[in-house]
Image (spheres, helix red, strand yellow):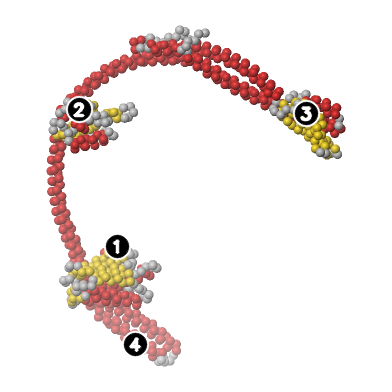
Amino acid sequence: MEFKKTSQLSFELLKWILICSTFFTFLGTGVQLYTDYRAGLSTIESTLDQIDRSYVRSISNSLWNLDDEQIKIQVNGIIKLKDIDYIKISEKREGGFQLFSELGEKHTKNVINKEFNLLYTSDNKKVQIGVLHVQASLSGLFSRLFDKILVILVTQTLKTFIVSFCILYIIHILVSKKIMTLVEFAKQLRVKNLDTPILFKREKEKMDEIDELAKSMNQMRIHLKMSIEKMKKSEENIIQERDYTKGLINGSPYIICGLTPAGITNFVNPLGLTLTGLSENQVVGENFFEILGSEDSQDKAITFFEESRYTELKDFILPIKFQNMKRIVVSWSTVLRRDQDGLIVEIIGFGADVTEKVIAEEELKRYQEHLEVLVEKRTEEVEEKNKELEANLKKLKTMQGRMIAQEKLASLGSLTAGIAHELNNPLNFIINFAYAGNENCKELLEEAKNGGIKDEKTQKEVIEGLQELKQFNHLIHLHGKKSEMIIKSMLAHSRTKESEMSYQDLNALIEENVNFAFHALRSKFRGFNSKVNLKLKSDLSKVNVAKGEIDRVLLNMFTNAFYSMNLKKQGGESDFSPTLDVQSEEHTDCIVINIRDNGIGIPEERMKDVFDPFYTTKPAGEGTGLGLSLSYEIIVGVHQGELDLKSKEGEFAEFTIKIPKVA
């Protein structure tokens, strides 16, 4: 069998077959030796167990009986056992153990020593009479293992070499020769001989892997031939498309240029060269930004370029001043050309000359700005007029409301005056006769108690009847007085315009009425207290007012405030601190009085009704409902002032009184 020097694969396979076979031979031999070694040790252990079972008891009896012949026979029997090479029997004496018998040669290495206690049973008690020492040698085991190693290694080595050379020959026939055929085919493969297939000398019905490889290479040869033909056609198409694209670029009405990521110019179409005033040799290979003219154009172009390196741009306006000193405005858009890894290899720019368009847009922008100024100016004028109209409308609504309120109060005043006059006379009779009846009841009651009636039963009935009649007269007199107070309030509506006017210090009126209202409420509700903060302007001007009417307004306001805070205090708010804030200010045309309490406030839905006559939130018998309506009539109707209310339920109520300086 001949092998070529080029059959490296066969020799590599032979080398690895030998290495692997040798490795597994040694591995198998090692496993076999370990198994035999463990089996040999097990045999020695079995021999020692056999000595314990078969010899120890008989030797103990012979030693007890001092039968030397029997002991000698037994020791010779033990020494003949496999791997046993030394036996010693020691007898126990008073001073310790003494040698009784010894046979064999004692070793110190590769041995297994074991001692057996020699016991004799007397009167059911075991007594130690000596020790049997047995030594087993491993030399015989090692010798047997060594012989076995030699046999295994020789046989395995011969088998390995024979099998390896057989495998090498088979590989050479089935693999190496075919591979060399494929190698020679690949070396001689050219475009001109793509029609020649790979053929082996001997064809087989069943194909192996190398046959499949040869078949695949033949198919690859056919595909390669077809691909080359397609590439030739594609190359022709590319040349046609290149010429067509070049024609489009050269004939385009736009500037078209290609730049590297570093800004170096790859190409510029003829229109770009015409606008720059440079030749192709002066532009291609040069930095694109150095041919743009002014520094301003260069800086803006660099900004444009930096942005276009990361994303495609559209309609980037860039004014350019070229070498021929001509200034144009170009609208640039970019397209990024990338390689297979997605890296940018070229930035293609498309520029449109939009100089005339930009000039027209700038002109239009100036007109728009001028128009915006005019519109803004006109808008400001319209807004001023609207503000004036809104102010006038607000005043008109306020005056309309006041006129309606005054008309309601005037009508109510006329009505109440007539009713009051009609009711006043009969009411006086009721009050006077109730008072007279009450006095008569007192006299009759005194006379009845002093013995005017002799019969005790009759006297008791008369006294009870007079007391009941006295109570009825008292109630008639009390409610008559309340009716009289209501009629007086109604009459006040009809006489508010007839009060005398005089110049008064409003601060003094405030202090006087707040003190009066505070003490009046304290006398009615024991334990009530409130903090009063007076912030009165020191040099407040005197105003022409009806003093009695203003007193009535202030007293009503303060009384309502203290009453509201007392209700809140009684409502269970333990940490509530009643506080009344009164402030006077002087404006150019009026005096302003603010009265604010932190009482229960007024619900928002009821605020529109508080100035209506007979409207009250107090319980029956606590108020007439005419206080605020009368106050409104006095401030608005008599003094041509203003009375406003702000409130938040549960937090505060604030009245603002404005009295004109000239009334």
- Nearer mark to the viewer, of 3 and 2: 3
Q: Is residue 615 above or below residue 274?
A: below
Q: Residue at x 41, y 91 (%)?
A: 450
Circles 2 and 4 in contact, beta carbons < 8 Å = no
Amino acid type at mark 1: Glu
Residue type at mark 4: give it.
Asn
Contact (CB < 8 A) between labels 4 and 3?
no
Closer to the eye: label 1 or 2: 2
Neighbor class of circle 1 (other Cα within 10 Å; few <14, some 14-19, many 20+) is few
Residue 312: tell me if it is visible.
yes
| Chain-order first, disc 1 or disc 2 | 2
Q: Residue 434, how many percent across, how many down? A: 32, 83
* Circle 4/circle 1 CB separation < 8 Å: no
Q: Alpha-carbon distance for marks 1 and 2?
A: 82 Å
Left or right side of 21 for 117? right
Residue at image point 43% right, 86% down: 460
Q: Nearer the viewer, mark 2 or mark 4?
A: 2
**Among numbered discs 4 and 1, the one appearing first in the sequence:** 4
Q: Can you identify the residue that label 2 sits on?
A: 283
Disc marking residue 87: 3
How crowded is the residue under tag 3: few (<14 C-alpha within 10 Å), some, or many (20+)? many
What is the spatial separation of the Cα atoms under label 1 and label 3, in whole angstroms?
125 Å
Quarter holding the C terminus is bottom left
Q: Earlier in the sequence, mark 4 or mark 3?
A: 3
In the picture, residue 239 is in which quadrant? top left
